[in-house]
Image: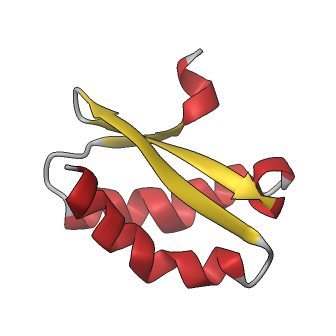
Amino acid sequence: MKEKVEVVLEKLRPYIMDDGGDIEFVKYEDGVCYLKFLGHCATCPMKMMTLNELFKESLVNEIDEITEVRLESEEN
């Protein structure tokens, strides 16, 4: 699963790297893909919009096993 997610993230990563951020795959569990924002994205007030509109949409559409995308901190 990690390899599938990384392929999608690599396509999207340039959009957030332009703003000084990055994203990493944390884990996949029961249909949920957990990600972690890094750099400027970690504290950006728009990170949930970015997660939902860019990463969630792409990951759910491109990887059948993924039904939800969450930030690592949401699991706590």
Position of residue 50 in the picture relative to residue 67 (left or right): right
Image location of residue 69, percent across then percent down = 42, 44
Position of residue 10 in the picture relative to residue 3 (left or right): right
User: Is residue 32 shown above or below 64?
Assistant: above
Image location of residue 10, percent across then percent down = 42, 76
Query: Residue at (27%, 42%) from the top-left corner?
Result: 67
**Viewer-side residue, 17 vs 45:** 17
The single residue placed furthest to the left in the displayed view is: 64
Residue 68: image quadrant is top left
* Colouring of the image: secondary structure
Image location of residue 5, percent across then percent down = 30, 59
Query: Residue at (58%, 55%) from the top-left corner?
Result: 51
Residue 28: image quadrant is top left
Query: Residue at (22%, 67%) from the top-left corner?
Result: 62
In the picture, the quarter occupied by the C terminus is top right
User: Is residue 46 shown above or below 34?
Assistant: below
Query: Residue at (78%, 58%) from the top-left corner?
Result: 46
User: Is residue 35 shown above or below 74?
Assistant: below
For the image shown, how many numbered marks are present on the structure? 0
**Viewer-side residue, 63 vs 72:** 72
